[in-house]
Image (cartoon, grey):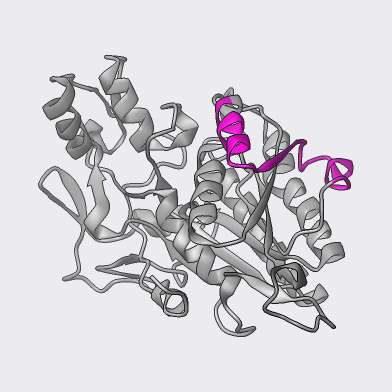
Amino acid sequence: MLCRAVPGARDSGAVENSYCMKILVAGICGFTGSTLATALLERVEGLSIYGIDNLMRPGSEINRAALRRLGIDIIHGDIRSASDLEKLPHVDWVVDAAANPSVLAGMNGSGTSRQLLEHNLAGVVNVLEYCKVHRAGFILLSTSRVYSIRALERLPLCVQDGAFRLDCSNVLPRGVSAAGINVDFSTEPPVSLYGSTKLCAEALALEYGFAFGFPVWINRCGVMAGAGQFGTPDQGIFSYWINAHLRRRPMRYTGFKGTGHQVRDVFHPRDLARLLHAQISAPRTEGSRIYTVGGGPAHAMSLQQLTAWCDSRFGIHQPQSDHSPRNYDVPWIVVDSACAPTILAGVAR
């Protein structure tokens, strides 16, 4: 139970004299935010969760109703507006799950580059200012797309079973192994406009934590997917591809000779909740603050393999082949989560 005695209390074991942890989830009505909030409530006894969301995404109202039934207090607000954070209660930790998650954000019709900066960078500054005032810890959900596109393109790859595979017989660059990419891999530009906003947010979070004395954790996440997503492109390729296949919508293998060999790993936000629980419980103040978190090689597949998976369940639906390259696309990203057990070891399974 994440409770601590109130200073001066005579009986620290009494419920009325204990203070139970409070968490604020920014972007709580999105798929990741709502799933994490639900999972943390299940994991952490006595936890109180608050949420803030601008309710602009499809499905937000559905998730808000479900979260309210769990007793979660949700404020309709936007972290881009500093005044919206003034009405938030004091909490011990903030989990930032509010962002434009599309790697093509600022480049396509879903929003401008300025709007992307406002969502993913200016909003983070407002949340960090809140953490400074309330001395709250901060957890940023970052992304594996902070890594260098050129470095990813130069990785030695071979094709096996309809998918790009890392060729470990070659000399591999720093930060990548058979287990995937870790925090030491290159973040040299270009990384995409989206990736650069998250990388800047990481740096600001660490600087705020150091300057004002509150704990900061950064989780560079691979693709998250699961029930409750709506199959839109900005929710990741797995959800989008399965939904498009099921509904017989046009699909394309874009770039890489139109083969569909490009690979991503996938995991569920519930898997991330266990790490967050460990991070808010960890007493240490030194050591690494940035972690890579994903499904790893055991949960990675190519578009061609994902199509075959869908064919076996929904019937055959063949994507078109488009050889045209697309901005920011890369052939292979698999995330190495080997560093996570060092934190998880401190929390009961």
Residue 210 in the image: state x and y as whole percent.
75, 76
* Residue 187 visible in rendering: no
Q: Residue at x 43, y 74 (%)?
A: 344
* Residue 334 visible in rendering: yes
Whether 248 is drawn above or below 106: the answer is above
Whether 203 is drawn above or below 250: the answer is below
Residue 330 in the image: state x and y as whole percent.
37, 46
Residue 261, by quadrant, is: top left
Residue 81 shown left or right of residue 3 in the figure? right
Was residue 86 drawn as part of the magenta stretch in this picture?
Answer: yes
Residue 157 shown left or right of residue 211 in the figure? left
Q: Quadrant of the N terminus?
A: bottom right
**Camera-nearest residue between 195 and 328:** 195
Was residue 101 drawn as part of the magenta stretch in this picture?
Answer: no
Whether 143 is drawn above or below 277: the answer is above
Whether 250 is drawn above or below 169: the answer is above
Q: Residue at x 56, y 55 (%)?
A: 141
Q: Which residues are magenta?
A: 62-87
**Camera-nearest residue between 120 and 268:** 268
Residue 286 in the image: state x and y as whole percent.
61, 85
Residue 55, by quadrant, is: top right
Q: Residue at x 66, y 55 (%)?
A: 48
Q: How many marks?
A: 0
Q: Quadrant of the C terminus?
A: bottom left
Residue 50 in the image: state x and y as whole percent.
70, 48
Residue 106, by quadrant, is: top right
**Camera-nearest residue between 279 and 239:** 279
Q: Residue at x 67, y 35 (%)?
A: 113
Residue 50 shown left or right of residue 130 in the figure? left
Residue 309 shown left or right of residue 284 in the figure? left
